[in-house]
Amino acid sequence: MRRLGPLASADVADSGSWIERDVACVWHGFTQMGAYADNRPVIVERAEGRELIDVDGNRYLDAISSLWVTTLGHRVPELDQAVRDQLDRVAHSTMLGNGNRVVIELAEALAPRVPVDGARFLFASDGAAAVEQALKIAFQFWTNQGVAGRTKYLAFGGAYHGDSIGSLSVGDGGFGTDVFDPLRFPVLRAPSLGEPGAVEAATDLIAAHASELAAVVLEPLVQGAAGMALVPPEAVAAVAEAAAARDVLVIHDEVATGFGRTGTLFATEQCGARPDLMVLGKGITGGYLPLSATVASERVWRAFLGPDLSERTFYHGHSYSGNALAAAVALRHLELFDEWHVLANVKARAEQLGHRLAGSVAPLARVGAIRRCGLMAGIELAPPTDGLRWGRRVSAACVERGVLIRPLGDVVVIMPPLTITGEEIDRIVDVIAEAIIEVTTTEVAAPTTAPSGQGEP
Ligand SMILES: *Cc1c(COP(=O)(O)O)cnc(C)c1O
């Protein structure tokens, strides 16, 4: 095995001791630390292209895009260079009351590409923070105009919008977050928009509660964390129409679907809608640096104009809002999308993935359903009893074969980088099919304590 890396310690330590060191001081999100080491985590040291390389030199095809953030691959020379070039200018300067050249350039480049009229960008670092900003902007949009009582939100079954208290409130729970229910503020909730009758339920709720609603918040085309629940474009358009008719703001959360995953730069484009607010995150920097944005329409933004220091100001902002390094890499990333014809590859590879899943995975016993939109796919396993942890076990069997997969409960998620090749798609599907056969035909073990369906995003 090839020796790797400049770290002297990498030569003496195997992954076992790295895992011990990890457990001794790092707390991993959405992870039971008591079981972490037993689940044989991959300790990444470096990467090449779409492969992650661990401290022992083992390679793993990153079939989940490092939890849905990586778009073009790891260590893209052009993106690396964009960070280096920006380092020679400035790493960060505050956006509160002052500006930064590369942030202006990024907003100018994004403005004509986002499906929001007269787009204004309020940057943050994580998706949840940008969702939180959208909720607060929608709320203050009404109070700024002297409209009282518009304090509620309409959200959907299966929704996931992040883990801060506000974003958790509009989300539908699950993933073990029910413990926080007492902290959530109440919202109106319609069924997931792919379910029969959901559009009628949503439009009825909008009609009945319009005078109390600040905004409707939805994930267009795909509810990723719900296990790739599909949202029909006509349903998104129908909700937009009903909301516009009653003057309720619409927020599109494109943190997961944005930046090409569904085959267009934004999923909203396929729905023919123009939301008042849109939330971007995850893929915005190609997976390089934490950056998110709340995009507001000019109409929304205008409602905040007023005298200096007046109460119409949006009194909200994060320390690292508009980080210059992140903005520089996001700007170069957007250019590369066009230069490399990334969306053409997404379309071709998505079609191939659909065919391969239909041919090699759908016919397998114990595969319940396959859902896919662009390069976002979920394979729902149908275990005979609860507690078998099939999602976890199939993913582990994939990792053993060098393909990094992480499930959502018993849904095996495939979300490869957008530059994935035809051979790599074949490899991912072949490995997943093998892993499903291995686990579902040989595992008759007694149920474990972990409840089935409790996934981790
Ligand atoms: C991941 C995600 C979020 C939260 O983003 P973070 O950067 O993890 O805070 C919000 N909405 C959707 C749809 C997501 O998939």
Image: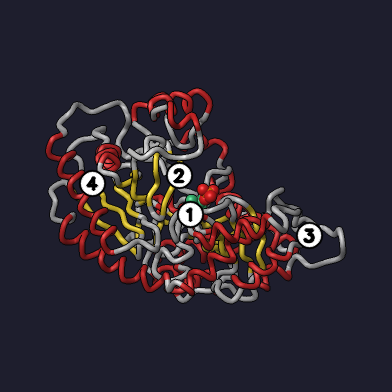
Residue shown at the point (86%, 58%) measured from the top left: 309
Q: Secondary structure at mark 4?
A: strand
* Alpha-carbon span between mark 3 and mark 4: 49 Å
Residue shown at the point (51%, 64%) measured from the top left: 206
Dot in front, 2 or 3: 2
* Alpha-carbon span between mark 2 and mark 4: 32 Å
* Alpha-carbon span between mark 4 and mark 1: 34 Å
Dot in front, 4 or 1: 1
Where is 90 relative to 52, above or below?
below
The tag earlier along the polypeptide, 4 or 1, is 1
Answer with the quarter of the image where residue 55 lies.
top left
Quick one: label 3, few (<14), some, or many (20+) residues within 10 Å?
A: some
- Where residue 160 appears, x then y in whole percent? 46, 50
* Alpha-carbon span between mark 1 and mark 2: 9 Å
Residue behind mark 4: 381
Residue type, label 1: Arg
Q: Secondary structure at mark 2?
A: strand
Q: Secondary structure at mark 1?
A: loop
Kindly tell me whether residue 249 is visible in this rendering: no
Query: Do the CB atoms of the residues marked 4 and 1 lie less than 8 Å apart?
Result: no
The tag earlier along the polypeptide, 1 or 2, is 2
* Alpha-carbon span between mark 2 and mark 3: 44 Å
Query: Do the CB atoms of the residues marked 1 and 2 lie less than 8 Å apart?
Result: yes
Residue type, label 4: Leu
Q: Does the beta carbon at disc 1 come under 8 Å from ligand 1? A: no
Quick one: label 1, few (<14), some, or many (20+) residues within 10 Å?
A: some
The tag earlier along the polypeptide, 2 or 4, is 2
- Where residue 383 appears, x then y in whole percent? 20, 40
Residue type, label 2: Arg
Disc marking residue 46? 2
Residue behind mark 1: 75
Residue behind mark 3: 313
